[in-house]
Image (cartoon, helix red, strand yellow):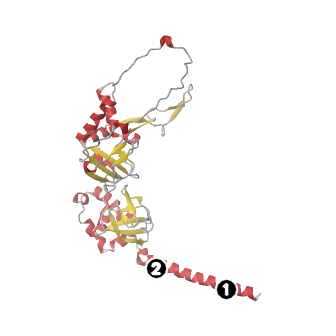
Amino acid sequence: MKFRFKSLRLVAVSMSLLLFYGCTKLTDDHNAVTDDSLNKTLAEVISSNPDLSTFAKYLVQTGYDKVVSSSKNYTVFAPVNSALATLDAAIINDPVKLKKFVGNHIAIQLYPAKNVTSLKRILMLSGKYNNMQGSKIEEAGITVADKYASNGILQVIDKMLPALDNSWEFLTNNAAAPVKQKTFMLSLFRNVYDVSNAVVIGVNPTTGDPIYQAGTDSIYTNLFWNQVYDLKDEKKQYTLFMLEDAAWDAEVTKYTPYFVTGTPDSNKLVTSWNVLKDFAIDTVYNPSSIPDTIVSKFGTKLPVNRSAIVKTIKTSNGIVYILNKADVQPASKFKPYLIEAETYNATSNDRRGNTYFRDRYNS
């Protein structure tokens, strides 16, 4: 019994020591992240830092000071004053643009830098996404990390985070987008059959198929969004290749003989589409690491000659490369089809009396 009693006492002492050191560790961790900032909102923490006075001023101008003073949790990436010294006056003097700019520095969830160990796209109040990994967000470095406030986390950064156009907005709005490819892409808006939100008003008694209310069984969309990639999707990232006008004409001319149709207009439409559809990839290829050959969604090999890249535009959801040449080979664009009939024996009906044959020769 004495031995058992001593064992119980030893366990009790051990548990007491564990509890003591555990509480001490919790207290130390608590003190490590608290100080006075946990009693202040993000707006108050930012306004109390003289190095963030310019950003604090913009918060007030845009009304975001009230947002980051609320009970919701945010992560604010606040640029130091020197980083904002070169902010375009066109943004500063335009309330809409300034609000979008400031909103691009506020995330709607908590993102401690120590926890974001792999690349993560985070949604900002601007509606845009920024790439964060560790002590970096886009091109900015986090110089003071994980400063906690009562309603979130402050990350002090050394560069601003401009609210860039996405790849489709660049194509639509930016004069740098080559005219001919842009014009063709903007001509691809159509009504496309889509019953996902259609209103059923009856059933066809013969086929059993649903009858939809007129106008609800289609959506007005762009064929490029619908069949290749939706370049306005901010959640994803893309690489888009655009050809200068002369290079676009050269590719269309090269492929025109392969897509012969009934009229010149339809020939040009079909040819242009088959040239265009291989020029977007759902992966970001940065200038420093872009390979010399990229395979498109449709299996076509797109050769990328770095010397042919005349302009590189970063967008909020990827990169646009403007090329002065893109020599896509027909052997890659056209896939082989193997038709086998060596085991054919006979027809089930003799239709020779009204079957007609025509030989067609194509050089």
For the N terminus, the quadrant is bottom right
Q: Quadrant of residue 314?
A: bottom left
Residue 87, percent from left and from top: 25, 62
Three-letter code for the amino acid on which mark 1 is drawn: Leu
Q: Residue at x 44, y 33 (%)?
A: 337
* In the image, farthest residue toward the top: 353
**Residue 44 visible in the snapshot:** no
Q: Residue at x 43, y 71 (%)?
A: 150
114 lies above or below 177: below
Q: Quadrant of residue 132?
A: bottom left
State the image coordinates of residue 288 (x, y, percent, origin top left).
31, 57
For image coordinates 35% across by 49% down, the residue present is 239
Residue nearest the observer in this picture, 307 or 191: 307
The residue wearing badge 2 is: 31
Q: What whole-number distance in Å separates the C-alpha atoms at marks 2 and 1?
A: 32 Å
Label 1: element kind? helix
**SS of the residue at dot 2?**
helix
| Quarter that holds the C terminus | top left
Give, as a three-letter code, the residue at label 2: Asn
State the image coordinates of residue 174 (x, y, percent, origin top left).
26, 48
Q: Nearer the viewer, mark 2 or mark 1?
A: 1
- Between 344 and 76, the residue placed more toward the observer is 344
Q: Is residue 33 above or below residue 186?
A: below
Where does the image place residue 285, in percent across and percent down from the top left?
35, 53
Number of numbered markers: 2
Q: Residues within 10 Å of mark 1 (few under 14, many from 20)?
A: few
Say which residue label 1 marks: 10
Q: Residue at x 28, y 40 (%)?
A: 181
Residue 120 lies left or right of residue 208; in this view the side is left
First of labels 2, 1 by sequence position? 1
